[in-house]
Image (tube, grey):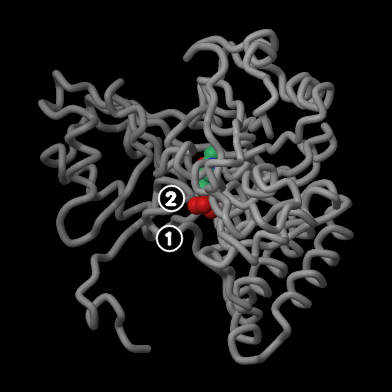
Amino acid sequence: MEDIYEKYQVKQVINASGKMTILGGSRVSEDICQQMNIGASHFFEVKDLLDKTGNYLAALIGVESAYIVNSASGAIAQSVAACVSRGKLQYILDIYNPENKKREVIICKGHNVDYGTPIEVTIGMGGGHVVEAGYANKCTLEHIEAKINENTVALIYVKSHHCVQKGMPDMKAFIELGHRYHLPVIVDAAAEEDLKVYDNLGADAVVYSGTKAFEGPTSGLLIGKKVFIDQVKKQSQGIGRVMKVGKENILGLTYAIEKYLSKEHLTLQQQSQRLEIFNQKLNANDGISARIIQDGAGRLIMRSEITFDEKKLSKNALQIAQALKEGELHIYTRDYRANEGKIEIDIRDVNDQELNMIYEKIVKIIGGRKDE
Ligand SMILES: *Cc1c(COP(=O)(O)O)cnc(C)c1O
């Protein structure tokens, strides 16, 4: 095979950061690529393909309706557009028409995150105006209720490690509140792994990224109530066109989800086993302490958390994370907490050889092995 890294002079990357969009999401397996190949090399009526793969997935997952889109962001924007246009073709075709005043979308302040793009931008693309409820560290149902008025068209709940985790309302109560006011509730669960739980709580639409937990191609999945998803589908005549999904990715994601639902997932214990040897080697160095921790938002992911002692190493975690990204081989770690002296290693897309390369590079950056 032609060496793409050589041909285009692109940088070689090890992804120990998780399902990062800036690195292309997931490593897509051979069998999924085969389905994408079939999609790419045949014709379909795309609407038919979307309807039928959606029905197939809805039955498989056990929900009323499912719809494949280009990305989780695309699913959010089109869901908002469905709420802003409210079935009126003139609004679908003119989603930002200022005469349509009903476009307020309520979100808890602690959920108004930047996942690479501020979610406000995504909601704005669908014609929504973000109205924040509550405060950074606290949002109650009363805070939300206080923001509901005749221009409110939807409530959005973001379930994510990016969000403030404490002081936020319970999702079920949030959904019930929306429904008490006859407002649709959209759940952004882009990086989550459970395809049933949020739908079961009664959300009108639940948004997933195809390339995160499900390890599919660049795509998104929307599941939820049929009446709601039917309105989202209509956006293909409007903003949906600028975010269309390709037939190769429709077939790729359908297969990826089928595979995800049927395969055995590595248990937390199995994930930990892989990390133990890596951590032992790191812990043999003075100034480094590594331990295994579960994902901060409670997902079934185990990672190695490495703490660097700046005094002993004369380098801090931020500098080490940066140095890992430089040179011949660009190693991306989870460095959200580097300011606290910690980085995390996510091994879902890292093989054993690469894990060893990460160890070697860390040792090199701290100036050689520091025997305890
Ligand atoms: C990743 C992410 C998105 C966007 O997903 P894409 O498929 O890349 O558009 C949206 N919301 C949250 C919380 C995310 O983590």
Query: Tag 2, which secondary structure?
Result: loop
Neighbours of disc 2 within 10 Å: few (<14), some (14-19), many (20+): some
Between 98 and 64, the one nearer to me in the picture:
98
- Seen at 33% across and 35% down, the residue is 335
- Seen at 51% across and 65% down, the residue is 242
Between 103 and 323, the one nearer to me in the picture:
103
Cβ of mark 1 under 8 A from ligand 1? no
Q: Is residue 304 left or right of residue 60?
A: left
**Residue 203: horizontal and vertical position, in percent?**
78, 36
**Residue 353: horizontal and vertical position, in percent?**
38, 60
- Seen at 51% across and 21% down, the residue is 110
Between 258 and 100, the one nearer to me in the picture:
100
**Residue 95: horizontal and vertical position, in percent?**
57, 51
Location of residue 177 by image quarter? top right
Per the rendering, the mark at residue 20 is: 2
Amino acid tagged 2 = Met
Per the rendering, the mark at residue 219 is: none
Q: Which image quadrant: the C terminus?
A: top left
CB under 8 Å between discs 2 and 1: yes
3D distance between C-alphas at marks 2 and 1: 6 Å
Amino acid tagged 1 = Gly
- Circle 1 is placed at which residue position? 24
Between 358 and 29, the one nearer to me in the picture:
29
- Seen at 63% across and 40% down, the residue is 189
Cβ of mark 2 under 8 A from ligand 1? no
Judged from this view, the residue extending furthest toward the front is 99
Q: Which image quadrant: the N terminus?
A: bottom left
Query: Tag 1, which secondary structure?
Result: loop
